[in-house]
């Protein structure tokens, strides 16, 4: 059994009289320590997929396994526990708590986990040691996203989920962020899943999942993923 | 819709489009309402509470005034009242009738009397029935003749009398009531006595217990006790309104104009009357004087005459005595002479006897000599007679011849002749003998007679002597008697003289006295003070006045309470609408970019707010106008006898309330909308830069900051981040706590009155009123018998009377208590109102109670005027202001009382007993009531019960306050938490994604609320303390001193209830937090 398994997952939303199929019988597998990039156009079901993996949304049918845990069967409280201990989430808009300094935002996550990492070390790792006492509003977008990543990995999660982490960033900064994620994956042997509509970054991944019309249409495995530095778009 | 002057008109799309747009706008607004109904309802509720409270409380006072106005108009209650110290006359009435602006002039009578019932003595005020101040009949009917009366219902209850029963009015001097017995035909309420308070009186305990009404013809008096006036136009205006007061003032001035003249006229009238009386008295005195003097003269004459006749009598007596003495001496001499004569005769007697014996012997010898002649003669006679008888016998023989016969005859004749001749001889002899014998007899007799005479003479002398002695004795006793009589008369005369002297003296004294009296009377006439007219208006009526004062308290209350609600309503709308506008920032930007002008865009929000405001406000108005006056009336109706409150839709306050609410709510909306709309569309379409995080002051104190857990740090920073919310929450919570605390504070204040008064101040439990005119011995006996009673601990003798304190035009009726001895402290604890230290009465000074000092604004050491029931005024100094909670008292030392008024007399006993149950107390009072000397008994326990009933109505206030406080707290908190959540939904979604448990999310957000609530509660307790102080100050009833202290438990209640309300809101928050969709965290920032 793979580390993460998506088995015939269906997700339907009822919007008034219309039923929208966000995920339509999707299946894929991800191995531990893999860097996965999920690509596809808007409305292909990427985010839904991520939400389900992150324990934020439920499935209509099908099964989801993460490290042998059947996520789709978890009860609310177990789901929270799952999010708390197993998942790190990086948002497109960073979602930092404005009222907390950079390091406090990291602490916000680390304090709720059992085997959390030291926030200061993490901050060092993401290269923000000097700016950790700054408030989000005093940081640039890239710096903010670094804080967000630091917050996500401080929990020492099994799975790092990133939803368009560079969506709000310029090219250079975006690259830096992706590099940070790649390094994290390699160095910490963390499973990282990145959602993006930018197919150009696909070569950096171990596995690329192409979403279209609610389905993982194509799964390609890069035997030799290349460093983000070498990718240009 | 109002067009903002800020908007350039050119931006408005063409007309038809504009209408469509507006329709679309309306649709949009309504949809918005549907989508955000919670926000809409919270604004609506604020408008409801704000307008409801404002309009309701504000309308109550006018409703109350209107109620009394209608009541008084219906009952034709006076607008002005005239009193005069010497009464008012028919002339006065005529003069008053001529004044312009006066509609009706009614001369009325009233008198306070004492009515005696089995065991009580009630001071009753008897008033005359008339067209003015009409009473309302409760039962029975109006009196139809002078012997029928109306009484108060409670009078019947107390005395046990019912309709048809007779009340006896005891005759007293100077009473103006004609009837001695009147029948109760009905019970009534009088508009003049709308409150439970009755007038003061000079009788009994100084206060009227009940009123009684009699027809005018039951009174008999030259002058009216009071004159009531009704004014033209006065009924058109509401009582106590400026217009009304103006009408009264105008007439008052006119009356002031004739006042002097009328006073003078009355003065002259009285003076002339008095002078006439004086003159009459003088004349009478003169007559009496003359009569008395002539009487004295007469008496003197009598005495002189008596003296004269007494002298005469003495002289006569003396003369008589002298004469008698002479006569007695003469008689004595005569007797002596007679005695001597008799003695001589006695000595002569033997000689005489001898001589007589000799005579007799001579005569006897002569007789002896004659005896033989007599014998011879006798023999011759017998022989001759024999011859004659023989002859006769012969003669009688028939056969005798005439010769014989002749011879015989001749013989016979011869014998007969010889016989005659012898017989003759014999007779001569006999005669001689007889003569001799007679002579003898004569001698013997004479002798005997002589002896006899002698004897008799002796006896006679003796008798005479005895007689003399007797008459002498008689005379003497007669004389003595006469002398005694004379002496007696003398003493009598002497006595008469003394009597006359003292009579004279008495007369002199009486004369002097009478003259002095006349002098006094003259002086008194000089001293007759000019009568003073008192021109009073309705405010002189205690019931009316305190009612108007109460309406003012309500008005004051209406000035403050709604402000709290309006301020909060404004803040709430401000936050809600700000949030709403912010949420729709992009939409606004888009619309602006599309070419809508500011007015059209803002219109949606204004319409939204206006709808909430108008709907909420209108409902609030209706509820407020009906409910609040009713509730407030419910409390006051316990204290006043009045018809039910007339409720109005008060346009004035309706518009004002709604206007204020609109200004607050719509204004707040306009402000937020415009401040957003002033930004350019591009600015609006970009996400609003999130509020930057800031370090708080607390972080600079590492000692505290380091010790806070991480989440607490977050909380602290959050609290300071959202200052508006911070302020709102605190104000909301503080307002809630303050209202609840004030509510409980009122309850405390009211429920503390009785224990304060009856446990802290009064230590006595029973007040025994004594019958008027009780003597000292009766009192002593009563005291003795009381002291012997079981369970009686202390008895203090006091005199209670009523008076009025005056200071700078402010007047207040008070009860005066004058203790007989210096032991008042034993039953009434006199303590300084501020320091609570025990104080004593000081010589020549009075102590007054706290509330009255406050009402007439006097301090310790001030001098004020004390007026008695006769309007006599004295200046007295205040030595102390003492603690007291019910009614007003003046404590006066006995010596001061006697200096100012008449001699002291006990009329009330204050009794402290140790009986600890009601039955024992009832039994004791029943027993005491049977005593002749006791007129009434009042038990503090029953007063307490009665007042408890009355005060329980005030619980409604507390409930109203708590409910409104709760509503307020709920609306504020609910709204704020909604705003809070919606504002921070992204943050909350994020931490949910981070894996915060529901509880942790809840704590993350509510810890702030808890801290703010705590701060709010603390501030609320402080605010509540002052709010309570304010409410107590404005609502305080004149005769009660509310304790402004709030019990600790009430603080606790306020805290607990606030916490309960907060918790309810927090529970609601918990569920809305749970519902937050984490997907929100992924959305782009709008």
Image (cartoon, grey):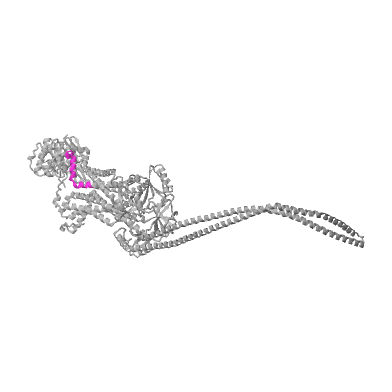
Along the horizontal axis of the image, is B405 left or right of B447?
right
Magenta run includes residue B964? no
Point out the image quarter for the N terminus of chain B. Answer: bottom left
In the rendered view, would you say A199 is above or below B400?
A: above
Which secondary structure is most common in the magenta stretch?
A: helix
Q: State the image coordinates of residue B1051 (x, y, percent, origin top left).
A: 27, 44
Q: State the image coordinates of residue A21 (x, y, percent, origin top left).
A: 19, 43
* Nearer to me, A83 or B134: B134
Image label count: 0
In the rendered view, would you say B530 is above or below B953?
A: below
* Nearer to me, B1005 or B682: B1005
Can residue A52 be seen here? no
Q: State the image coordinates of residue B487 (x, y, percent, origin top left).
A: 52, 55
* Nearer to me, B141 or B385: B385
Tell me which segment is drawn in magenta: B703-731
Please identify the quarter of the rendering in which residue B1063 is found: top left
Please identify the quarter of the rendering in which residue B175 is found: bottom left
Magenta run includes residue B718? yes
């Amino acid at each position: 059994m793979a580390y993460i398994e998506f088995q015939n997952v269906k997700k339907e939303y009822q919007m008034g009289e219309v039923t929208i199929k966000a995920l339509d019988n999707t299946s894929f597998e991800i191995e531990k320590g893999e860097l996965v990039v999920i690509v596809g156009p808007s409305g292909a079901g990427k985010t839904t997929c991520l939400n389900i993996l992150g324990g934020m949304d439920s499935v209509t049918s099908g099964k989801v396994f993460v490290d042998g845990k059947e996520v789709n069967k978890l009860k609310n409280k177990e789901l929270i526990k799952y999010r708390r201990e197993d998942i790190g989430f990086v948002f497109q808009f960073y979602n930092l708590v404005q009222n907390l300094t950079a390091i406090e935002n990291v602490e916000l996550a680390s304090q709720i986990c059992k085997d959390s990492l030291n926030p200061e070390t993490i901050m060092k790792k993401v290269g923000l040691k000097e700016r950790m006492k700054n408030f989000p509003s005093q940081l640039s977008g890239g710096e903010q996203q670094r804080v967000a990543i630091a917050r996500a990995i401080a929990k020492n999660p099994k799975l790092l989920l990133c939803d368009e982490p560079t969506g709000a960033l310029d090219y250079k900064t975006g690259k830096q962020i992706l590099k940070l994620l790649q390094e994290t994956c390699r160095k910490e042997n963390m499973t990282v899943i990145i959602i993006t509509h930018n197919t150009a970054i696909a070569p950096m991944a171990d596995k690329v999942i192409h979403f279209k019309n609610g389905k993982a249409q194509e799964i390609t495995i890069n035997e030799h993923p290349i460093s983000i530095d070498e990718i240009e778009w | 819709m109002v067009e903002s002057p800020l908007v350039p008109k050119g931006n408005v799309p063409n007309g038809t489009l504009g209408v469509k747009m507006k329709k679309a706008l309306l649709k949009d607004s309504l949809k918005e309402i549907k989508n955000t109904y919670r926000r809409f309802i919270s604004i609506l509720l604020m408008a409801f509470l704000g307008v409801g409270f404002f309009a309701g409380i504000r309308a109550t006072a006018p409703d109350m005034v209107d109620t009394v106005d209608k009541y008084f108009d219906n009952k034709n209650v006076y607008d002005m009242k005239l009193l005069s110290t010497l009464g008012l006359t028919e002339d006065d009435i005529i003069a008053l009738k001529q004044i312009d602006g006066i509609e009706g002039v009614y001369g009325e009578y009233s008198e306070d009397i004492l009515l005696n019932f089995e065991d009580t003595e009630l001071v009753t005020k008897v008033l005359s029935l008339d067209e003015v101040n009409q009473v309302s009949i409760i039962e029975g009917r109006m009196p139809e003749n002078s012997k029928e009366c109306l009484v108060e219902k409670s009078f019947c209850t107390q005395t046990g009398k019912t309709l048809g029963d007779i009340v006896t009015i005891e005759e007293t001097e100077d009473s103006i009531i004609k009837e001695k017995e009147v029948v109760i035909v009905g019970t009534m309420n009088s508009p003049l006595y709308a409150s439970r308070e009755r007038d003061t009186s000079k009788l009994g305990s100084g206060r009227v217990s009940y009123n009684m009404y009699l027809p005018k013809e039951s009174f008999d008096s030259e002058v009216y006790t009071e004159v009531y006036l009704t004014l033209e136009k006065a009924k058109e205006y509401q009582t106590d309104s400026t217009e009304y007061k103006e009408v009264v003032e105008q007439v008052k001035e006119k009356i002031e104009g004739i006042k002097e003249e009328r006073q003078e006229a009355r003065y002259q009238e009285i003076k002339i009357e008095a002078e006439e009386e004086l003159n009459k008295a003088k004349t009478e005195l003169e007559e009496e004087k003359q009569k008395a003097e002539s009487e004295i003269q007469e008496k003197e004459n009598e005495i002189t005459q008596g003296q004269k006749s007494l002298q005469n009598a003495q002289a006569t007596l003396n003369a008589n005595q002298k004469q008698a003495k002479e006569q007695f001496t003469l008689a004595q001499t005569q007797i002596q002479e007679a005695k001597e004569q008799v003695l001589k005769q006695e000595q002569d007697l033997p000689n005489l006897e001898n001589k007589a014996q000799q005579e007799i012997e001579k005569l006897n010898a002569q007789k002896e000599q004659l005896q033989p002649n007599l014998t011879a003669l006798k023999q011759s006679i017998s022989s001759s007679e024999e011859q004659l008888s023989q002859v006769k016998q012969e003669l009688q023989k028939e056969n005798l011849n005439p010769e014989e016969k002749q011879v015989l005859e001749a013989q016979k004749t011869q014998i007969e002749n010889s016989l005659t001749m012898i017989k003759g001889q014999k007779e001569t002899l006999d005669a001689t003998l007889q003569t001799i014998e007679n002579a003898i007899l004569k001698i013997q007799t004479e002798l005997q007679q002589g002896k006899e005479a002698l004897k008799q003479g002796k006896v006679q002398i003796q008798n005479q002597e005895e007689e003399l002695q007797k008459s002498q004795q008689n005379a003497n006793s007669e004389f003595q008697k006469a002398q005694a009589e004379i002496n007696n008369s003398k003493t009598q005369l002497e006595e008469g003289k003394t009597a006359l002297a003292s009579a004279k003296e008495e007369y002199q004294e009486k004369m002097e006295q009478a003259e002095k009296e006349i002098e006094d009377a003259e002086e008194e006439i000089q001293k007759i003070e000019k009568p003073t007219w008192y021109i009073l208006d309705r405010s002189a009526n205690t019931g009316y006045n305190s009612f108007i004062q109460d309406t003012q308290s309500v008005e004051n209350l209406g000035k403050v309470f709604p402000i709290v609600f309006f301020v909060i309503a404004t803040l709430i709308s401000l936050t809600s609408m700000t949030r709403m506008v912010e949420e729709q920032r992009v939409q606004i930007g888009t619309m602006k970019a599309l070419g809508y002008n500011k007015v059209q865009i803002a219109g949606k929000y204004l319409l939204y707010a206006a709808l909430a405001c108008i709907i909420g406000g209108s409902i609030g108005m209706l509820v407020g106008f009906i409910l609040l006056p009713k509730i407030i009336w419910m409390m006051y109706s316990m204290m006043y006898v009045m018809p039910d409150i007339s409720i109005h839709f008060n346009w004035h306050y309706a518009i004002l309330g709604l206007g204020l609410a609109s200004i607050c709510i719509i204004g707040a909306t306009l402000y937020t909308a415009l401040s957003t709309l002033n930004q350019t569309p591009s600015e609006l379409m970009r996400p609003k830069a999130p509020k930057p995080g800031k370090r708080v002051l607390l972080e600079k104190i590492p000692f505290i900051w380091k010790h806070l857990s991480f989440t607490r740090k977050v909380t602290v920073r959050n609290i300071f981040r959202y200052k508006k919310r911070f302020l709102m929450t605190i104000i909301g919570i503080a307002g809630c706590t303050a209202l609840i605390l004030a509510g409980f504070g009122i309850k405390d204040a009211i429920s503390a009155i009785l224990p304060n008064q009856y446990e802290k101040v009064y230590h006595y439990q029973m007040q025994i009123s004594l019958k008027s005119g009780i003597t000292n011995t009766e009192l002593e006996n009563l005291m003795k018998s009381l002291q012997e009673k079981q369970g009686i601990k202390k008895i203090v003798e006091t005199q209670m009377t009523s008076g009025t304190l005056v200071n700078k035009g402010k007047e207040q009726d008070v009860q005066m208590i004058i203790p007989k001895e210096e032991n008042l402290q034993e039953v009434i604890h006199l303590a300084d109102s501020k320091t609570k230290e025990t104080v004593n009465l000081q010589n020549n000074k009075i102590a007054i109670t706290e509330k009255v000092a406050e009402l007439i604004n006097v301090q310790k050491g001030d001098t004020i005027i004390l007026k008695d029931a006769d309007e006599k005024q004295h200046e007295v100094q205040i030595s102390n202001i003492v603690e007291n909670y019910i009614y007003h008292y003046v404590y006066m030392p006995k010596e001061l009382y006697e200096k100012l008024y008449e001699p002291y007399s006990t009329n009330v006993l204050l009794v402290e007993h140790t009986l600890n149950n009601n039955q024992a107390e009832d039994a004791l009072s029943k027993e005491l009531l049977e005593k002749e000397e006791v007129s009434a008994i009042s038990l503090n326990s029953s007063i307490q019960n009665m007042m408890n009933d009355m005060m329980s109505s005030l619980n409604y206030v507390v409930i109203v306050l708590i409910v409104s406080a709760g509503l307020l707290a709920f609306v504020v908190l609910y709204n704020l938490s909604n705003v809070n959540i919606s504002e921070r939904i992204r943050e909350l979604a994020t931490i949910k994604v981070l894996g915060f448990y529901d509880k942790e999310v809840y704590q993350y957000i509510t810890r702030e609320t808890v801290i703010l609530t705590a701060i709010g509660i603390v501030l609320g307790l402080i605010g509540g303390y002052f709010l309570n102080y304010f409410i107590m100050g404005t609502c305080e009833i004149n005769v009660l001193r509310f304790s402004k202290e709030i019990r600790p438990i009430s603080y606790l209640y306020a805290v607990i209830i606030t916490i309960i309300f907060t918790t309810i809101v927090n529970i609601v928050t918990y569920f809305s937090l749970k519902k937050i969709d984490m997907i929100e965290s992924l959305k782009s920032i709008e």
